[in-house]
Image (cartoon, rainbow, N blue to C red):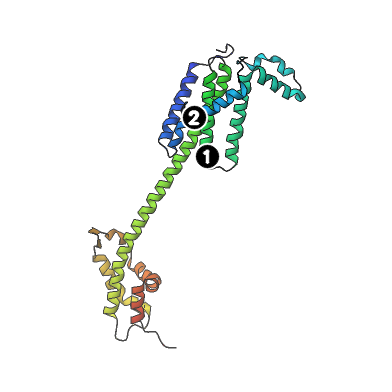
Amino acid sequence: MDIFCCVSADFYKKLDKKKLELRNDISHSVWKDYAEFLDENSSDIQADLNYLRVKFYGDKRMRGSSIENASHFKTYKVGEKLMGEKYIRIHYPVQACWKYIASDNFRITFSSLIGGAPIESIFFIHLYRASLSYYWGMSIIDKYECVAFNALSSASSLFDKCLGILYAQKCFDKKEELSKIRAKAGRKGGESKADVYRVIQNELVSLIYKLAPEGGWKSKTAAIDDVIEPLWNFVEESKFVINNKSKKYRVLTMSQDALADTIRKQWSTKIECVKLAFEDKVTRKKS
């Protein structure tokens, strides 16, 4: 183990607990299929880990426990930076590999955020990079704890972001579900209210024909004035039993004046049976 780095056991305990919490949350979400990427045996994760080993280690033995050991790198000038990186890659492949992973972590996750990717894609990208960093760090921890700690810290941060995205998505899903429930209840409520109105409209048509004077009314207003009182008595006395249930509560906030106004402005022009009744029994003055 790297003698230059001492990480408390509590860090690893909290990290494993966080990973377990994330796995559990994913398993109970709409993205449950992504939980497999938290498994060390994930074929995609293993393929990337193997790619990194071949790219940076090849058949060479890992050397160098800490990049700080190569203190002479600090004497390089800016123009010789590439030479320094090449030296690190040759003599300190573990550090070079982590630098490559960390750079990709930032580049890929940041691009997903600013590129307008769907939230599901953003979540998957963060999850995958977190899992890759975690298992890569665990694969080197026995010999290179300092470098492993950097990788695991990055994984921990990405796990936190995944948990945050999951929480936000759950809140959004609940809001969507609540909207659907309200819309469904509204439709049912609207249908129930429409059923009550149809009963009143049928009674209105009956009263128009029953109370119409010989020759009809001279105006729609006069007709409404004559039928509104007996119609209102009907509304107050009726229990509006529809589908074996009383819908009386649907008219509790209605008033006689409001009903007359509704007949004048809406039913007499938009409800076909009411409209025809008025047209039949209201005599227009000839110009």
Task: Give above or below for 33 relative to 217.
Answer: above
Name the residue rendered at 36%, 57% in the picture: 187
Local secondary structure at mark 1: helix
Q: Residue 284: horizontal and vertical position, in percent?
A: 39, 84
Label 2 close to label 1 by CB (< 8 Å): no
**Three-letter code, disc 2:** Ser
Q: Quadrant of the C terminus?
A: bottom left
- What residue appears at the point 55 percent right and 25 percent down from the top-left corner? 50
Question: Relative to residue 87, is residue 281 depicted above or below?
Answer: below
Mark linked to residue 121: 1
CA gap, disc 2 to disc 1?
A: 19 Å
- Indicate the position of residue 272 as horizontal and vertical percent values: 36, 73
Whole-percent x and y of residue 12? Answer: 48, 20
* Residue for point 53% across, 33% down: 126
* Residue 154 visible from this viewpoint: no
Q: In the figure, residue 270 lies in which quadrant?
A: bottom left
Q: Residue furthest front?
A: 59
- Amino acid type indicated by mark 1: Ser
Residue 83: assigned label: none
Quadrant in which the N terminus appears: top right
Query: Which residue lies most toward the bottom here?
Result: 287
Q: Which residue is mark 2?
A: 43
